[in-house]
Image: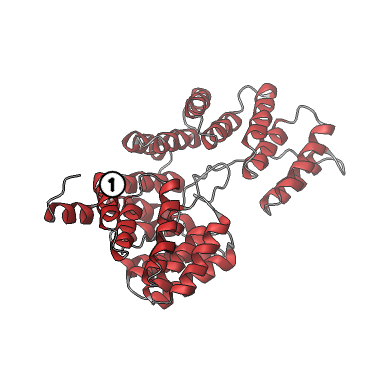
Amino acid sequence: MKKTISLLLVAVVSAATLQAQTKTFTRDYTYQQKTDELSAEDYFTKGENAYGNRLYELAIEYFKKAIAIEPEYANAYNDMGNAYSDLKNYNEAIVCYKKAIAIDPEYVRAYTNMGNAYLNLKNYNEAIDWYKKAIAIDPEYTNAYNGMGNVYDDLKNHNEAIDWYKKAIAIDPKYAYAYNNMGLAYSDLKNYKEAIDCYKKAIAIDPEYTNAYYNMGLAYSYLKNYNEAIDWYKKAIAIDPEYAFAYGNMGTASYYLKNYKGAIDWYKKAIAIDPEDVRAYTNMGNAYSDLKNYKEAIVCYKKAIAIDPEYAYAYNGMGNAYSDLKNYNEAIVCYKKAIAIDPEDAYAYNNMGNAYYYLGNYSEQRNCYKKAARLGHTNAQEWLRKNGYSW
């Protein structure tokens, strides 16, 4: 039976640090000369320190105090917007950026951060407008070009995205983020060798760039060079021992090398860092299934579903485990739940057909195979063709 192992999310670079890993935009901060104790600048500096320690709510409180003393403090509004962005409160971030721009209409960073916020809200037209405004103010502002590339990458226009990343790099050949994001665009085009070249350039510029190491691991995984992938994931973890996705994908690479026990160990480490990692639980269930420990696999799948009741892969995997335990009726229940979530899940239809076969319900078996075949499942197509059925 087909077991789906999912690679975890790729690491991209963004104004708000996203688990994607989404796309990371650099921020430049302007500091005014410190004068009196408990001045606006004092609170601003406290806010920056809190922000640097990822204490975003505390940072917001300090920025508010700075603004209360100095209502025209554009930098405080901008950086408060950044803190809201990292809390994923993008609408409130936009309010802050607009206030910064109202105070300083030439504040290019605020325009770019506004584009980032709209990008995170998937309001791509607004994001493009704000990035273009930033470029109009400063044609050499690389972050805006990077943001434009991120928009087009999200829109699946990867070639256009690459053109924007190249523009950023033409202005600043040491722009590691643009190289990383260009690598992701090439990866989406399945040009993994070109992607690897981009990641290597990013790492040459910034040897501590964990996302580039991680994305290099993903590229080698897509090339099925799992041992090389593991080496790159380990390098990412050496820099950031709390990088849960790297542990999870190291588990996936180990799984494909048929090192199921090793895979389980890596998934456990990922879960220890991020107890809500639904993919790690699901993939760990797959590894237990391949070790024929189906009961433990079901425990893992149930944990994944408890975290995300809409995660179809976990239902499909649990159905496979019940099938392997010859509990075909329970397996069918699981496959039906997977299909209810994702009606295009060809594997769930095919696996449900297998379960009906073992129950001797050949009519339902054929119906399931036909649905799987229409969705492109080649095994189902081959069986139907061999037995004289159309789909």
Q: Is residue 120 left or right of residue 347?
A: right
**Where residue 331 appears, x then y in whole percent?**
41, 62
In the depicted view, which residue is nearer to us: 80 or 245?
245
Q: Is residue 348 left or right of residue 115?
A: left
Could you tell me which quadrant the C terminus lies in?
Answer: top left
Question: Does any portion of residue 246 appear in the rendered image?
Answer: no
Could you tell me which quadrant the N terminus lies in?
Answer: bottom left
Classify residue 320 by image quadrant. bottom left
Q: Is residue 216 above or below residue 134?
A: below
Q: Is residue 161 above or below residue 287?
A: above
**Where residue 31 appears, x then y in whole percent?**
70, 40
Number of callouts in the render? 1
Q: Is residue 40 left or right of residue 132?
A: right
**Where residue 102 appears, x then y in whole percent?**
68, 22
Residue reaching furthest to the right: 37
Q: Is residue 184 above or below residue 200?
A: above
In the depicted view, which residue is nearer to us: 356 or 190?
356
Q: Residues within 10 Å of mark 1 (few under 14, many from 20)?
A: many
Label 1: which secondary element: helix
Classify residue 88 by image quadrant. top right
Q: Which residue carries the number 1 mark? A: 371
Question: Callout 1, which amino acid?
Answer: Lys
In the depicted view, which residue is nearer to us: 252 or 337?
337
Q: What residue is drawn where x is 84% and y is 39%?
A: 39
**Where residue 36 appears, x then y in whole percent?**
86, 41
